[in-house]
Amino acid sequence: MGTLLIRHGYIADPGSGFEGKADLFVKDGRIEKVAENISKKADRVIEAEGLTVLPGLVDLHVHLRDPGQEYKENLVSGSEAAAHGGVTSLLAMGNTRPPMDSLYRAAYVINKAKAETAIHIYQAGTITRGMAGEELVDMEAMAEGGVRAFSEDGKSVMNAELLRKAMKEAKRLGVLIAEHCEDRTMVLGGVVNDDENAARLGLPGISNAVEDVIAARDCVLAAETGCALHLCHCSTKGSAEIIRMARKIGANVSAEVCPHHFTLTSDDVKADDTNYKMNPPLRTKEDVEALREALADGTISCISTDHAPHAEDEKNRSFLEAPFGIVGLETSAAITYTELVKPGILTLMQMAEKMSRNPARVLGIEAGTLQEGMPADIAVFDFSKSYKINPRKFLSKGRNTPFGGRTVYGKPVLTAAGGKIVWEDLK
């Protein structure tokens, strides 16, 4: 596979705890040496003076739309978008068409990804057959075939006893349950947060309780079963408090928050722009502050995107009719650095922890660190200069983002997965 030398970059590695200027030498897909002034000859030398070198980002929440909706995204376009954003490993959600409810279907993505993409794609299985919420999938067969996580993302398993059975099985198999927390009996057609802005927009609201009720239920079940539980796209102050309480009763629970939920509020929503329509919805300033605090104190350990591409004509409908979801693979690092690191809410090392090391640990994969001997999954950023987000330059098929035109810091300039350069924009 050859050799690669990245010289004079500023390295932040949450795996080893090292932060400072150094060189990084890659051989045969793995990191061989991290030190000052490495003199080894390499097939390719990258001069990284003034640039920041992080472990490749690990995104636990991505919709690749394959199979069934490849016009929105496919494995190739999704992997290219990931590389463009510094993401080298991702977990693809299972709410495809048909759903990922068997080893046969999961193997389709796993094998196709290995053949067609250069980054590491892990496929989540659904918890129930057909995502119907009535019968568990064969979790053992799927786990033995390489499925590391199970999720009904897009909705919750409403039957608590069925979910408890899934959690017991997940505990036995050593796999993850990733839950989208939404009590569907309380949604009532809502499309935005249930606050004064819903009235301003003339749209039905979704209350915080829709999320909080399921988050509390799932944490109680996780504490009882010992299952590793991951709460997806947390958006409320209540979720953060529930996670804190759950750990006190012994729940093995991790959680993620998306950049849009720690950056934007319901005040930002425009009735004529469905790029602001996502599920869960944008919440209040109080919720945003609580999520930021939870990230800073470690209550919420991961930052993921919930990357959800849609075709332009689908989003160009009314707020009631357009699908939920925005893209995020190509903007997550820049938004996180701009909104959390520059203001001093997180350190650079904490950002690397929450976007690489911690997600890798949650999923149980060999990633998230630049330690010697580890796979050479590397993301290099230029945090020194600002630029405006331009959705037309995305490599994803989706352009549906509320961040178009926003000024940010953190341009990805090089991404390597397994030692292979998969994105480069060094100028």
Image (cartoon, grey):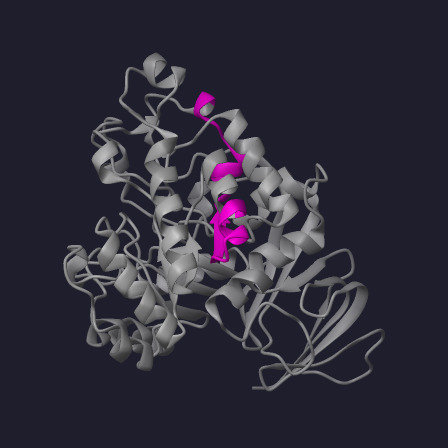
Q: Residue 68, position in %: x, y?
A: 19, 59
In depth, the one of 337 and 179 nearer the eye is 179
Question: Is there any visible trace of residue 420 in the rendered image?
Answer: yes
Q: Which residue is painted at 68% across and 75% down in the image?
A: 371
Q: Does 427 sit left or right of 323 as displayed? A: right
Q: Nearer the viewer, residue 220 or 294?
A: 220
Q: Residue at x 70, y 56 (%)?
A: 349
Total marks placed: 0
Of the pair 318 and 146, the residue shown nearer to us? 146
Q: Nearer the viewer, residue 352 or 125?
A: 125
| 141 in relation to 416, above or below | below
Q: Is residue 276 above or below residue 421?
A: above
**Residue 278 position in % (x across, y down):** 35, 37
Image coords of residue 358 (percent x, y)? 57, 61
In which quadrant is the N terminus drawn?
bottom right
Which image quadrant for residue 199?
A: top left
Q: State which quadrant residue 271 falls in.
A: top left
Location of residue 64 in the rendering, given as x and y in whole percent from the top left corner? 32, 58
103 left or right of 14 in image: left
Stretch in magenta: 244-267
* Farthest-out residue, top: 200
Residue 263, magenta (yes or no): yes
Instruction: Answer whether residue 6 is magenta in the image.
Output: no
User: Is 139 placed above or below 270 here?
Assistant: below
Q: Residue at 64% of width from left, 41% of height from top?
A: 340
Q: Is 348 on the left-hand or right-hand side of 250? A: right
Q: Quadrant of the C terminus?
A: bottom right
